[in-house]
Image: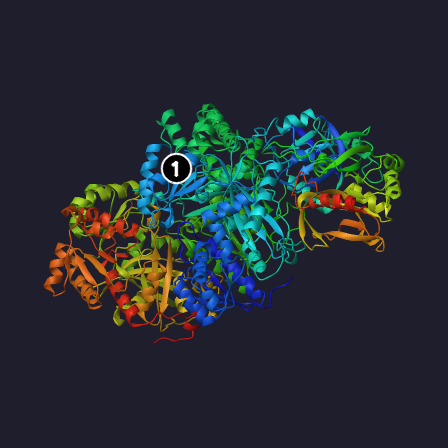
Amino acid sequence: MPKDKSIKKILLIGSGPIVIGQACEFDYSGAQACKVLRQAGYKVVLVNSNPATIMTDPEMADRTYIEPITPEIVAKIIAKERPDSLLPTLGGQTGLNTAVALAESGVLKKYNVRMLGANLKSIKKAEERDRFKKVMTDIGLEVPKSGFAHTWDEAKKVIEHVGFPAIIRPSYTLGGMGGNIAYNAEEYKEFINWGLGLSPISQVLIEESVVGWKEYELEVMRDKKDNVVIVCSIENLDPMGIHTGDSITVAPAQTLTDKEYQIMRNASLKIIRAIGVETGGSNIQFAVNPENGKLYVIEMNPRVSRSSALASKATGFPIAKIASLLAVGYTLDEIPNDITKKTPACFEPTIDYCVVKWPRFTFEKFPNTNPELTIQMKSVGEAMAIGRTFKESLQKAIRSLEIDRYSLDNRHIKGSLSMFELKKKLRTNCWDKIWYVAEALRRKLPVDEIFTLTKIDPWFLNNIKDIVKFEEKLKHIQDIRQKTKSPLKRSGLKSLGSAVLKKAKEYGFSDKYMASLLGVEEQELRKHRQSLGINAVYKTVDTCGAEFEATTPYLYSTFESDCEANPTDKRKVIILGGGPNRIGQGIEFDYCCVHAAFALKEIGVESIMVNCNPETVSTDYDTSDRLYFEPLTFEDVISIVEKEKPDGVIVQFGGQTPLKLAVPLEKAGVKIIGTSPDSIERAEDRKRFNKLVEKLKLRQPFSGTATTYKQTVKIAERLGFPLLIRPSFVLGGRAMRIVYDPQELKACVEEAIEVSGKHPILIDKFLDDATELDVDAICDGKKVVIGGIMEHIEEAGVHSGDSACSLPPVSISKKILAEIERQTKLLALELKVKGLINIQFAVKDEQLYILEVNPRASRTIPFVSKSIGVPLAKLAAKIMTGMTLDELQFTEQVHRSHFAVKEAVFPFLKFPGIDTLLGPEMLSTGEVMGISDDFGIAFAKSQIAAGNTLPASGNVFLSVKDADKPRAVEVARRLHAMGFKIIATKGTCIELIKNNIPSQFVLKITEGRPNIVDSIINDEIDLIINTTIGKQSIKDSFSIRRNALDKQVPYVTTIRGALAVAKAIEALKQRKVDVKPIQLYYRQKGK
Amino acid sequence: MKAILLLEDGTVFKGTSFGAKGQKCGEVVFNTAMTGYQEILTDPSYNEQIITMTYPLIGNYGTNNADTESRKSFARGFIVKENCDYPSNWRNKQSLSDYLKANNIVGLEGIDTRALVRHIRTAGAMRGIISSTEFGITSLKKKLQKYPGLVGRDIVKDVTVGKPYDWDKGVIDVLKGEEIKPPKKYKVVAFDFGMKLNILRLLRSHGCDVYVVPADTSAKDVLARKPDGVFFSNGPGDPAPVSYAVETVRKLLGKVPIFGICLGHQILALALGAKTYKLKFGHRGANHPVKNLKTKKIEITSQNHGFCVDMDSLDEKAVGLTHLNLNDNTVEGIRCKDKPAFSVQYHPEASPGPHDSNYLFDDFIKLMDKS
């Protein structure tokens, strides 16, 4: 059945900003969909609010709307574009929910748009618990026992057939909030009452808990002719009870006999048919009782999911691409397998390696939250590793995570940890449990007992035991070496023979860890290893277990005899990617790496990508000429360099990860292209940077460095408060604090010294109430062109990644802008930048200060590129290969007439108990962009896209610190003029009344009842403006912010943000929110 | 403990021994299925073959008493990347290594199996000797040279049953433990060329009263039992020298409904005047796409064959092509146009592999109903 010719124009809905549970995997799937649908001759209209995506590049779709993904906005786009079809299954849960809302509200019917892939009925069957359960029972499959309750009496009845332990899920709470596991009647009553209170419709689902069962996933594909294939099976190392996104998972399934696997396969076929997903991919989760094989169906996602991305990367079978083709009528037998070219996509991939996926957590960012893993996802990214055995993949996955761990060693475990405490650790679901498992094995706890404590299948435990035992062997060699009297033997690695070393490498041990075990430098061990002829070889991911020849070089390393890399002798460049997503380093850097690959392709240079993040576009085998799916450590990268012998390596696009490798790689003789590692260091090293600023006669805030509290006090006396205290050599503003008075100083300094380790801490004079600016520029060593100047909405002191910003700036004088341009050029040329440079400035009292210089791709590159319509990263990559800005015809800053506003998106809701206040430590996971010819509308769009729905009327709560009072008056005046009722705490209230703005007085939490928190809980507040200063005030107002978040009341914690919000509400009231594709914005020239 | 594999072209793979000790010659082949090693090991079609598993981690779930496909294993050797000595599965009874020992199969682990597979893929399936008792290349080479290989030899006689017998076991539901055993409605004579037990189980579960006979049973003896249908099973090696069976099929054609699988399919084709040839490295795995040319639907199939029916040799007037392999467009199924007989090259009985093609057993029942 060839393609459906009645389809002409397809609307694709993206997944919006990166949040926990919905990350770059949907850029990967959406980008594949755009590409393949356009190749098939369809017009594609795309909507996605996330500018840091490849899919929103202007050439990816015919019409690209970087607009908020809400049913209202998408309805406007439909009215304007009149697509005949909507593909709802590639944009994650956001895309699916929006499509459902459009179908239910009648918009799709009104404009005659049909849903491709899955229709409303099948989506509902899969997503609604009751219906799903009924369908499963009808086809003879079992689901965990469950029931709904609206009262305690009902709940009592439900538990009779469900039994303990029971999972309680309140209905319709955001992000699974209020979900709990009750082990006894007492807990049950407590959780039921709590859940009923939380649920807006007073309903809870009570479900039989299968905690401790084995968890499996199958990726299923179906076409119009009802051909169904299983793309991949996944076995979770972590048992049921931990969200699959937070679990270590392995592909393919390891411990199922063929009989059991076929039962699961047959069930999957039945399910996809019964639910009625017509075409495309689905993910089905199963729980298996390890004692008797009993099988439960847990859930089904009737769409491309995070697991689909993983399955695609794990097998080489591009699920999203094929799902798109199936949606428009092709059948599996008509689509060729990209990797073999000769065989069709209608088959089930078979793999001859083992894949391990490991989640990446950032609990260190949220010290006040419980780091236990539960049924609600908490990880922010993941790494995937491919090896020939589970042991090899496991160890590769660990070093792919970049958490400064290279093995299962016990460096992070207190030696004094008692067996009792260790067992307790094994019982709790901490993120680093595997290290405790290894420790337990080291202490000779039997596998059976560890299984009882952890419910991790003994197969995994025994594999880990193999690793631990081998580690002991290596340690033993070291012991013998130290005892020997012969100096020759002691100094060399002679005692480490070829057989042991070969085996160690096959087990996945890193050079770095082995070197540390043997008390030698990594380089020494490496040399010794190579002298024995033990080198990494590369194998191909080919979908077929080598049965057919693969034409796509998608490679991974292992230690065996046969190498399939076959490097070419073309001109080539290696691009180092960014590794797993984390807060501070995410999709923005992957976007840059992908652009580098595209750029190289355009100029005929072979692009070689190295990365280990399965969610990304960069690890699509289509993106670069050659793909190495490998950890980004020195050892793994240098092996590839030695094999490929590239003309250069690009390190400045993947964030800190590859940047950290720049110096060691250069020392090893690798050619780093673009800005030199020395220049990068000159900007990062505090002392050298100070000299640079002095040399250029520029200004930066007064500062000092200290290693003790005493020194800090002295500096504080000299600089005066407020101060910005931070450790050196950290990422994303870790442990960075602003201190307003001597009382707070001590605690902050102690924390910073601890985080900083050997390095001194940095103390800056904090520019209170300054305006912060970000500049991205491009330089070829001779010429500098500004990409964009962004003005932060929040005042200086909020991390630039967390701050909203506007391009162009809205309140900066021409004189300052000219000065920014001058200084940017000066710095870029002085640092001999070849590529991108990002500079952060602050303006206070018409005085410009330099805060930071980063001669590399910054987080804002995609935002700037999307705003001005110029692919800066692509240009920079070309410059690195030797081209000039003149040759690239980018010689002047591009000015546009529209405003683009970037807003950050935060994961607060997922972490109960943490404060939502913004500060110098970055906490956001993603970003959105609002674009309009009017600033107010652009800002409003950014807020809507970020999920902060601005009220048009109602009650505003206002409580601000003293310094903000003058501006608070202006904010209140504007809001009052629009008919808002102002409610304020004492000080603010008096100030407003003094200025003739009517305002109602409300108690602070510390002042008695009823207070402001009562009002929030009682749904009496529609907008919260709350600015604070000092520890006490922050503590006092914490529950305001937290309750605002939990009750989904929009809140602002900076006064400048409040002003922007007031202006945005004005704009929304005066003007219509229009939608316009970016392709049209780029036709407009600015002043 | 060392073990070694020497190929006829001189290529050597050195690894570690597991399972039984010894040395054996056979044709070196590979299977790409990720599950089902026990079924593969006990499939008599692997007689005189040394099996390499492409999936590197084998033995993970051990072995049990239920997942066997014949009375014993006929494989000559078993090669894996990493054998697992700590199996984990609720049905596990014995580790793979112990199972190989008990069945006297020589195992080799720790070699670059992907390199071996790529070598076979490029150079074609070839003879090899696996040894864990002797490692001298010259001596092994001499032994290997004496081994004649599969082409032109009847190796069915080594695996077929000695005496006829009645079969009365149905398929057992793994989770519930229930045996599917409807009343017997059809008398079926099943030729054992090296039959997988799951074929027998499925026939019984489809209501067949099954009588298993040796490969050289005559047509006269079969017809004397007045069967409703005759089944020709899978089996090892080259179909051409099994001429006595080809002759039997020829005599039965048109007299009784016939269903053939794998070697049974090739023998039916030969009886219909077609030719067979040896594939470069065969089809062995559980993921091969086969298109049913009547329904146009795709089945993911379990496969295990080194020889194949030549499509050009099919007599278009008498035989219709019913199933096609989408990977290499080879013949996967045929049906007589004017006689009640059909056959498939692949394995609808699965075990291991997908159950997509179980419907062929229903087709056999329908054919018997019609005749």
Residue A822, located in which quarter of the rendered image?
A: bottom left
State how the image is colored.
rainbow
Q: The disc numbered 1 marks a residue on which chain?
A: A
Q: A893 and A329: which one is in front?
A: A329
Seen in the picture, residue A11 relative to B254 is either above or below; the reply is: below
Q: Image check: A108 left or right of A1034?
A: right
**Front position in the image: B52 or A943:** A943
> Residue A708 at x, y = what percent?
23, 41
- Left or right of B33? Residue A977 is left
Q: Is residue A568 visible?
A: yes
- Amino acid type for the residue under numbered disc 1: Lys
- Which image quadrant for residue A162? top left
Report the front residue among A474 and A989: A989
Residue A424 x/y as whole percent:
38, 29
From the top left corner, tell me how far across and down residue B109 is, in percent. 64, 33
Mark 1 crowdedness (10 Å alpha carbons): few <14, some 14-19, many ≥20? few
**Where does the N terminus of chain A fall, quadrant-wise?**
bottom right
What is the x, y in percent for residue A768? 20, 57
Determine if residue A832 is in view: no
Find the residue positioned furthest to the left: A994
Q: In terms of secondary structure, where does tag 1 sit?
A: helix
Left or right of residue A725: residue B162: right
**In the foreground, A857 or B181:** B181
Relative side of A1025 to B296, left or right:
left
Q: Residue at x 36, y 65 (%)?
A: A930
The residue indicated by pointer 1 is: A157
